[in-house]
Image (spheres, rainbow, N blue to C red):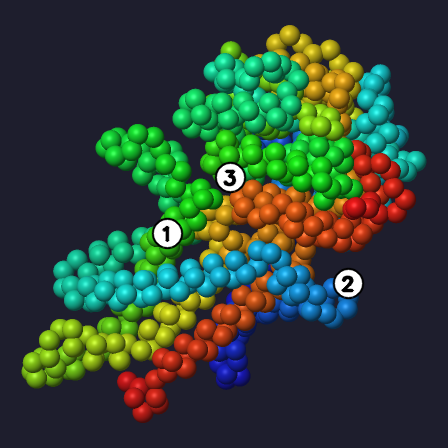
């Protein structure tokens, strides 16, 4: 009898221990690193971080990237999810195809886009063979940062839209058919059905998808590193740089704390903006 | 429940057994010969003959130091032998075993380097392992554009700029290349070549008017530099693809070009500025951490690395030259044949200003390099004014040097206390 009572806790124990040992404990260590220097509690690391000449550019780049990538992905994920849920034939085949980029590591995704945009990459050899240009163009050079930015946006959109789509497909499956049938009876056109039924009832899934995606957007690293090297600094890249190249764990930890703070702030914001009143829950 | 527990203990036991059964090979933990091919050659032709086997593991400087520090803090480790540049050793004097007792037989090691490797103490903190430097390489097609009266064996920065300008204007695209990518060794150029050539200093005269004119000259050169330079790491690749015709880089990073097409390329000394021909000799050493698991074996491995035949094999694998007296066989790779005379001309030049790698900075080495890279990014890529950037970066340099409390190193004159930044 006793063992059945304890069973749920025992089953939870491995995951809990795992989280405490490999997440909570290192997290506390990082927090200590960020707020101390040589044993004394101080904000020096944060001061070093913000006074670096690259800091404002880094922060701006990260925010800009999130601000551009997430809305594009939201729109695309919504339309992809709608297509998938409307399909009666080949639904899972399409779903799998859409989800292929999810199976790749983000570094691999970055490298794929690098082979396209490189000076000796696919895009250049294609343009040359079509006779549109007579010699390869340097797309990812330091002079045209906006091309680097565009390439990163493309890479990110290609790689991570599917994760939002998967969540939204699941959410759309939960919306009762009766609402749509009623709307059709009253003659609501498809766009109206989408904005008046799908979107409002999709709120919980939208919330999850957006939170997940926004957090990931602030952690963007490998795609940027592959495509731009150090020419398009982002917060996560600077964290790595301070930890491994500059050997300053304190400042690296400060960057990590900043990313955490931004992520928490946006999570709370999204929780508030997309909240579902208790009485309106399905 | 019992079953589950049994299963878990079983799994834990198995894991412990697996990890405990690690190989008995000596771990050679190195920051050198990192590229996959070089590392593989180190394993296949250099350390293979060592009895008991060697696990040669190269890594980036950061992770290299992190693991070493962790082992030293723990008081026990698995690293048998360390391979790194002089500058990396100089900050860990206390953690290294005295190697003066290692029996080298009749091998004669370069005395100057040996003295340097004592790191100012009475002990042999590490043994010099191999040496290299940076030189210039050019495609023979570029030679016809050399400015009139210029001697390729004794170029000046003015002539280099003029040469690059000629090539850019007459061929329609910039043909000078510079390793300014994230993995490129650009900081070494500013520290050991550009600044010493204009100021005879790496640190002290960082923001002097002479340094200002050096940066201005480099800015001029940059106009005729292939803009893809910000992606280059190893100049041998753009040289071979003929994206660039003239380039500066580490000899080991030019070697493929000389090896694959020795008839198409020439090697020549770096240019000189008003203060002389600044260049940076690179000295790598091998040492043993106090936490090495098998001290006798580690010392044997060190002695093995110093043998003339191992040194020649190392040259073949890494393009780093021996530090012991040895007669090179005739069948050396082309890269050695091509770059050898250029290196000799550079080291032996009358106006030579040798500039040592930063010494004693330890884990601040990365930040030291960053100061030079930031200066480059701001002045050259960002187009900011030279004077204010130098003033600001000099502040950072000053703070860093006083934090590290290191005295000056060559070519800056010896200092009492931290190296001053004027």
- Given the current orientation, which residue lies at the most extreme top position? B330
Residue picked out by circle 1: A150
Residue nearer the viewer, B265 or A28: B265
Gap between marks 2 and 1 measured at Cα: 42 Å
Residue nearer the viewer, A211 or A146: A146
Residue nearer the viewer, B193 or A49: B193
Question: Same subunit under labels 2 and 3?
Answer: no
Name the mark nearer the viewer: 2 or 1.
1
| SS category of the residue bearing label 3 | helix
Question: Same subunit under labels 3 and 1?
Answer: no
> How many C-alpha atoms fall within 10 Å of the one at disc 2: few (<14), some, or many (≥20)?
few
Gap between marks 2 and 3 measured at Cα: 36 Å
Answer above or below: position of B415 versus A263: above
Q: The numbered mark 3 sits on a residue in which chain?
A: B
Residue picked out by circle 3: B230
Name the mark nearer the viewer: 2 or 3.
3
Picture quadrant where residue B117 is located:
top right
Residue found at x 82% / y 40%: B408
Residue picked out by circle 2: A38
Q: A77 left or right of A269? A: left
Gap between marks 3 and 1 measured at Cα: 18 Å
Residue found at x 84% / y 36%: B413
Residue found at x 60% / y 47%: B385
| SS category of the residue bearing label 1 | helix
Q: The numbered mark 1 sits on a residue in which chain?
A: A
């Amino acid at each position: 009898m006793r063992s059945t009572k304890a069973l749920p806790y025992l089953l939870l124990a491995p995951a809990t221990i795992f989280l405490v040992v490999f997440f909570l404990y290192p997290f506390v260590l990082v927090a200590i690193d960020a707020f101390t220097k040589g044993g004394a509690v101080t904000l020096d690391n944060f001061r070093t971080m913000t006074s670096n000449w690259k800091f404002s550019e880094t922060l701006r780049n990260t925010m800009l990237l999130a601000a551009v990538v997430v809305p594009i992905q939201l729109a695309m994920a919504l339309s992809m999810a709608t297509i998938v849920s409307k399909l009666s034939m080949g639904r899972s085949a399409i779903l799998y195809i859409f989800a292929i980029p999810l199976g790749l590591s983000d570094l691999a995704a970055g490298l794929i886009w690098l082979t396209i945009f490189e000076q000796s990459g696919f895009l250049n050899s294609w343009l040359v063979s079509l006779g549109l240009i007579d010699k390869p163009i340097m797309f990812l050079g330091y002079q045209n940062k906006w091309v680097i930015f565009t390439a990163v946006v493309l890479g990110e959109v290609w790689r991570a839209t599917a994760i939002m789509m998967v969540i939204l497909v699941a959410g759309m499956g939960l919306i009762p058919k009766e609402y749509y049938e009623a709307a059709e009876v009253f003659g609501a056109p498809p766009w109206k059905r989408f904005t008046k039924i799908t979107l409002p009832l999709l709120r919980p899934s939208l919330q999850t998808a957006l939170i997940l995606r926004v957090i990931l957007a602030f952690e963007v690293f490998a795609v940027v590193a592959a495509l731009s090297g150090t020419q398009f600094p982002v917060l996560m890249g600077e964290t790595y740089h301070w930890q491994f190249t500059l050997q300053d764990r304190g400042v690296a930890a400060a960057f990590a704390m900043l990313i955490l703070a931004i992520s928490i702030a946006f999570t709370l914001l999204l929780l508030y903006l997309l909240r579902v009143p208790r009485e309106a829950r399905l | 429940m019992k079953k589950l527990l049994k299963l878990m203990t079983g799994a834990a036991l198995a894991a412990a057994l697996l990890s405990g059964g690690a190989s008995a090979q000596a771990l050679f933990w190195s920051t050198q010969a990192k590229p996959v091919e070089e590392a593989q050659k180190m394993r296949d032709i250099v350390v293979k003959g060592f009895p008991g086997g060697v696990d040669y593991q190269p890594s980036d400087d950061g992770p290299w130091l992190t693991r070493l520090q962790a082992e030293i803090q723990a008081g026990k480790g698995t690293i048998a032998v360390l391979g790194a540049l002089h500058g990396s050793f100089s900050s860990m004097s206390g953690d290294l075993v005295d190697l003066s007792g290692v029996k080298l037989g009749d091998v004669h090691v370069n005395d100057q380097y040996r003295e340097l490797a004592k790191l100012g103490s009475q002990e042999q903190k590490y043994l010099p392992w191999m040496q290299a430097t940076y030189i210039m390489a050019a495609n023979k097609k570029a030679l016809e554009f050399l400015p009139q009266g210029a001697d390729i064996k004794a170029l000046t920065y003015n002539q280099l700029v003029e040469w690059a300008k000629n090539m850019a204007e007459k061929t329609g695209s910039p043909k000078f290349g510079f390793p300014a990518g994230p993995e490129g060794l650009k900081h070494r150029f500013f520290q050991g070549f550009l600044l010493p050539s204009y100021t005879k200093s790496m640190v002290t005269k960082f923001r002097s008017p002479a340094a200002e004119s050096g940066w201005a000259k480099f800015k001029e050169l940059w106009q005729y530099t292939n803009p893809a330079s910000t992606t280059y790491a190893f100049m041998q690749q753009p040289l071979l693809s003929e994206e660039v015709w003239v380039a500066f880089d580490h000899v080991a990073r030019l070697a493929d070009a000389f090896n694959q097409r020795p008839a198409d390329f020439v090697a020549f000394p770096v240019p000189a500025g008003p203060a002389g021909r600044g260049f940076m000799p690179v000295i790598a050493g091998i040492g043993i951490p106090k936490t090495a698991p098998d001290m006798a074996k580690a010392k044997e491995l060190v002695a093995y690395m110093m043998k003339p035949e191992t040194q020649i094999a190392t040259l073949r694998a890494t393009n780093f030259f021996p530090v012991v007296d040895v007669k090179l066989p005739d069948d050396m790779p082309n890269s050695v044949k091509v770059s050898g005379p250029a290196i000799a001309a550079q080291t032996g030049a009358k106006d030579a200003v040798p500039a040592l790698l930063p010494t004693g900075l330890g884990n601040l080495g990365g930040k030291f390099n960053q100061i030079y890279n930031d200066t480059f990014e701001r002045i050259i890529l960002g187009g900011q004014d030279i004077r204010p950037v130098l003033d600001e970066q000099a502040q950072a340099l000053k703070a860093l040097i006083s934090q590290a409390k290191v005295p000056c190193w060559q070519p800056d004159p010896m200092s009492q206390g931290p190296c001053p930044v004027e």
